[in-house]
């Protein structure tokens, strides 16, 4: 997403910037920026926090995946119907529980995760299917450990927003970092 490039700019030899990088659920990140605990956050945010400025950042394509030894792995997409998908154990993102069920038309979740690392572990266990960002899954796909299930049908782009407090609009460090993130991300955002 270009974040590493923006960080590189601020951590040059003469920089005196302290970086506190953290992962969290979208609602946690949104609350942290609203409370002033974080200066800038990026994620699939709800845009509901008062006093927070939201800016489009990028789209992150996701596909539905299964592991190499899952029954759907060797089945051609043309033979995978809704009954086959419904019969598989489905892992959802807990913060988008019903969205994931709706996207697949699956009757129920069998597991829930907060982060993609946990989702990957469940899918690689061969017991679950679930959504992952395409860029994150690509190395496992190339290694033959994962495959996207009917990528023309089971896909979505997660809209990621950049957010900071309206009260911080005049803070030069925050605005410089936001500017750098937006400049470095232009190529990636266009791929959404």
Image (cartoon, rainbow, N blue to C red):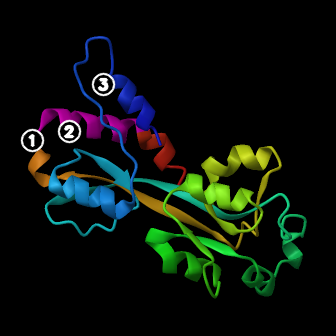
The answer to which image quadrant residue 44 occupies is bottom left
Q: Position of residue 157 (x, y in %)?
A: 54, 63
Q: Circle 2 sits in a helix, a strand or a loop, which is it?
A: helix
Residue at coordinates 60% horizontally, 61% vertically from top-left?
A: 62
Q: Quick check: 74 above or below 53?
A: below
The one nearer the camera, 130 or 160, is 130
Of the image marks 3 and 1, the number of the one nearer the N terminus: 3
CA gap, disc 3 and disc 1: 18 Å
Judged left or right of residue 114, residue 16 is: left
Q: Which residue is mark 2?
A: 175
Of the image marks 2 and 1, the number of the one nearer the N terminus: 1
Judged left or right of residue 62, residue 72 is: right
Q: Position of residue 154 (x, y in %)?
A: 67, 72
CA gap, disc 2 and disc 3: 12 Å
Residue 180, magenta (yes or no): yes
How many residues crowd mark 2 within 10 Å: few (<14), some (14–19), many (20+)? some
Residue at coordinates 89% horizontally, 78% vertically from top-left?
A: 79
Q: Residue furthest top?
A: 13
Residue 118, magenta (yes or no): no
Q: Which residue is mark 3?
A: 10
CA gap, disc 2 and disc 1: 7 Å
How many residues crowd mark 3 within 10 Å: few (<14), some (14–19), many (20+)? some
Q: Circle 1 sits in a helix, a strand or a loop, which is it?
A: loop
Q: Position of residue 94 (x, y in %)?
A: 48, 70
Q: What's drawn in magenta, residue-wise?
A: 171-184
Q: Which mark is residue 170?
A: 1
């Amino acid at each position: 997403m270009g974040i590493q490039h923006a960080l590189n700019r601020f951590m040059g030899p003469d920089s005196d910037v302290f970086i506190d990088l953290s992962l969290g659920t979208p609602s946690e990140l949104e609350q942290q920026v609203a409370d002033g605990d974080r200066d800038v956050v990026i994620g699939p945010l709800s845009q509901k926090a008062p006093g927070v400025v939201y800016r489009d950042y990028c789209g992150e394509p996701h596909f539905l995946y299964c592991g190499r030894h899952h029954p759907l792995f060797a089945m051609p997409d043309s033979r995978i119907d809704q009954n086959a998908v419904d019969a598989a154990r489905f892992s959802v993102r807990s913060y988008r529980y019903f969205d994931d069920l709706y996207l697949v038309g699956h009757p129920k979740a069998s597991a829930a995760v907060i982060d993609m690392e946990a989702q990957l572990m469940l899918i690689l266990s061969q017991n679950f299917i679930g959504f992952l960002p395409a860029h994150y899954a690509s190395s496992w796909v190339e290694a033959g450990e994962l495959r996207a299930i009917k990528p023309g049908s089971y896909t979505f782009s997660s809209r990621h927003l950049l957010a900071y407090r309206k009260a911080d609009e005049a803070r030069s460090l925050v605005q410089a970092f936001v500017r750098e993130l937006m400049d470095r991300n232009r190529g990636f955002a266009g791929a959404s």
